[in-house]
Amino acid sequence: MFNNKELFKTVFKEQLVSRLGRSMEDATAGDIYKILGGLIREWVGQEWAKTNQNYRVQQEKQIYYFSIEFLIGRLLGNNLLNLGILKTVQDGLLDLGWDLEQIEEQEPDAGLGNGGLGRLAACFLDSLASLKYPGHGCGIRYKYGLFEQKIVDGDQVELPDNWLQKSCVWEEQRLDERVEVCFWGRVEVREKNGSPVFDTVNCEKVWAVPYDVPIIGYDSSIVNTLRLWSAQPSIDPSVIKSGEFNRHDRFLDYTRSVESISEFLYPDDSSYEGRLLRLKQQYFLCSAGIQNILRSFDKLELSYTKLPDKVAIHINDTHPVLVIPELMRILMDEKGYGWDEAWDITTRTVSYTNHTLLSEALETWPVHMVRELLPRVYMIIEEMNKRFCGMLLERYADRQYLVSQMAIIEHDQIKMAHLAVVGSHSVNGVAELHTKLLKGSVMKPFDDLFPERFNNKTNGITHRRWLMHSNSKLSHLINESIGTEWIKHPQQLLQLKSFKDDAAFQEQIMNIKRNNKLRLAAYIAQKQGITVDPDSIFDVQVKRLHGYKRQLMNILHVMHLYNEIKDAPTADHVPRTFIFAAKAAPGYLLAKSIIKLINVVADVVNKDPEVNSKLKVLFLENYSVSLAERIIPAANVSEQISTAGKEASGTGNMKFMMNGALTIGTLDGANVEMYEMLGDDNMFLFGLRSEEVLEFYKHGGYLARDVYEQEPWIKRVIDQLVVPGPFCTYDREFELIFQSILEHNDEYFVLYDLDSYAKAQAAINEAYLNPQDWASKSIVNIACSGRFSSDGTIHQYAEDIWDIRQVQPSNFV
Ligand code: 26Q
């Protein structure tokens, strides 16, 4: 049906009538979306069932990717692309009077994540299915995704993201596969055949109900599964009769507390209740996921010692680390294994990725909290700690300090990263520099102890979503120039290098970019009523708002440009449009005041007729996957300006590169590997190196106040934060920002790097004045970006960590 436009149109119209009771003439865009999504979901059902059946029959080893976040965004466009039916559907709908793009916009973003870590999980699922690997996601079906951001008078306001309101066309509830998860209770020990047996009594039971989302591979005939768990009350009628729920309000309390488990991504953790809820979420995911894996494994009728041959479990940061004690618990308490055997099975099955070196993001949980909520799991963690410390004591008899430094439990806190390293067979960082720093700093003693465990896997992005879907014109131009082999082998994009000096190709590249800029300009005009000049440099910084990402440095530089223009209004300036989008964590006040500052500066700059033909500033609200897909193809300049050593990898950097933007950046995260390919000719580097930053942290020697006193233009912009003037309406308006720099000595070296940043920005202006040269650099960026396809990353995980193989659907029964 989907390969024949006329047939598609006929079926589509029939469905519209039979399912919705609507004729084509009366249908809304929402109706069209619903019918189209439903049709596709049904159509992939066959291949979904076939994939699952064959995985079962052929007993292929499966990888389960556990993540507290899956930032998958919209699925319609990508599913059409991967199924190879985009064109038929697009043309068919056009005949019926509808523009596919408009239909795609009907789909709410599945915002089940807040940034890089969650988006990486989504890119990995796309690569797994496209490369025919048996790999699935395991996550939580949050009722509300990451908050919707509104900007009101320059301030961020958070609204709930009720993405399921209109029901999700892709998901399938599988009630028959629900499992029970237990909280609280008390552990009782009894003896059976001379061995202790542990029972948890009086626990609170919760149903974990799976909702499956098909993950469709690109031209692969593989449909893998993202299984999202939802919490529902589990009430045994006998319990109600027995009187425990004789009071209606207690029943309601229970129901509320259960449903809250899968209600919000990142519950507010400023209170004890909030933190407890987060811990509940983590265990809920781990326990449901592990029970589910073991249930499938049971069907193979193999010994559990064979589990690592059939299953790999990967944990995306430490949030799902409780899979380790949970697997131990089931193997020992339910399957009858002893500690050593269970430990061997568990560690050979689990692997772990670290995504951050920031100390505030390294998870710890108070012992009492885990002990109360998960008494049996706590006993197992305690035993792990005891055994591990015992081993350390023997090995490091002369260096006892290492024992407390490496312990899993210390000062009544459980260190989840230590638990992850000790309980898994592989630990990886997400870019070469990050892995080097991980091995050399926070994880140093672990790397000394288990050197074979540590490895690097540089992140990647799916070129299907981030190039083929979001920038289809560029994708088609590439096909015309180097053929289509790059689609399956993205490293082939390197062939584009031979076009870098081809004037006709350069012009085509620049035309596509200009069209993308016009499309973004139209969006901006519609949303904010502001016109932007498509011939200005579109300079973009879009990512979570965080001190280390240094959006502040960017906006301080913009304030400086404003000052320069005001000082010499008739001087020449290369016109620039600075575009920001970012969400700040609701409780992160400094980040919120940076959002406010950006909005204030935007307002001043955009309204000043002396300035606004040369400089514009936009803050686009509610940054999300779909907004990223609109913004990134339109960028000329990509801002990747984190304090060196702080950004584990970054993945936005790769998306911009793949879309032909030039990067202004520090030698941080994966920027280092981009630079290795691009060199000084094709990237604008500036700022401190990570070794220098570390040296300052260790030995001091940096005083932000010195820079402030010695560089007049910097003093001027810093003062403008607190002295009434163009950007500050009342005395000390941006005091928080001012203090973070001068009182707290600029933790992220914003002032230190500001001058070198301004010089790199000036170099960009120079380069932009030569359009051929700029186009050539842009082409080299696209050509080198294939190295950062998540396909390459997934092949490495598959081979080095998971030991899984690509399947051949042609052999499917
Ligand atoms: C930790 C403790 C308590 C509460 C929350 C958290 C928490 C939540 C989310 C800690 C970290 C995160 C998310 C981290 C993240 O997104 N890291 C990014 O991962 C990307 C993929 O590897 C990298 O490219 C980015 O550099 C990294 O910042």
Image (cartoon, rainbow, N blue to C red):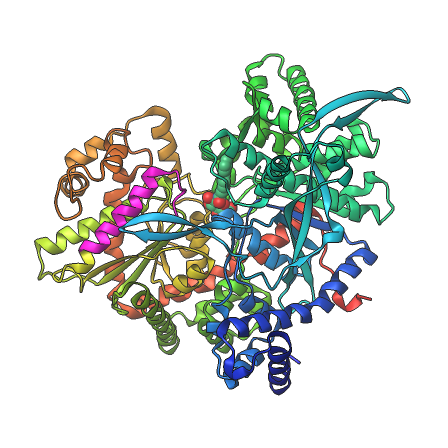
Quadrant where the C terminus is found in the figure: bottom right
- What span is colored magenta in the figure? 583-604
Looking at the picture, does residue 766 appear above or below residue 749?
Answer: below
User: Is 699 colored magenta in this rendering?
Assistant: no
Q: Vertically, is 398 above or below 8?
A: above
When asked about the image quadrant of residue 368, the answer is top right
Q: Looking at the image, which residue is at 68% across and 54% down?
A: 135
Return the residue nearer the eye: 597 or 345: 597
Q: In which quadrant will I find the N terminus?
A: bottom right
Type of secondary structure dominating the magenta stretch: helix
Does residue 156 appear in the picture of this structure?
yes
Q: Is residue 730 above or below residue 79?
A: above
Residue 603 on the magenta segment: yes
Q: Name the side, left or right, on which 760 lies relative to 325.
A: left
Lateral position of residue 427 relative to residue 781, left or right: right
* Residue at horizontal 33 percent and vertical 33 percent from the top: 747
State left or right for residue 691 relative to residue 18: left
Q: Residue at x 61, y 39 (%)?
A: 252
Q: Is residue 454 visible from the viewing direction of this image?
A: no
Picture coordinates of residue 188, whole percent (x, y): 77, 22
Q: Nearer the viewer, residue 637 or 608?
A: 608
Quadrant housing residue 421: top right
Q: Is 567 drawn above or below residue 586 in the view shown? A: below
- In front: 246, or 776? 246
* Extreme residue in the top direction: 398
Q: Position of residue 157 (x, y in %)?
A: 36, 48
Give the image location of residue 782, x and y in percent. 44, 64
Which residue is situated farthest in the front direction here? 247
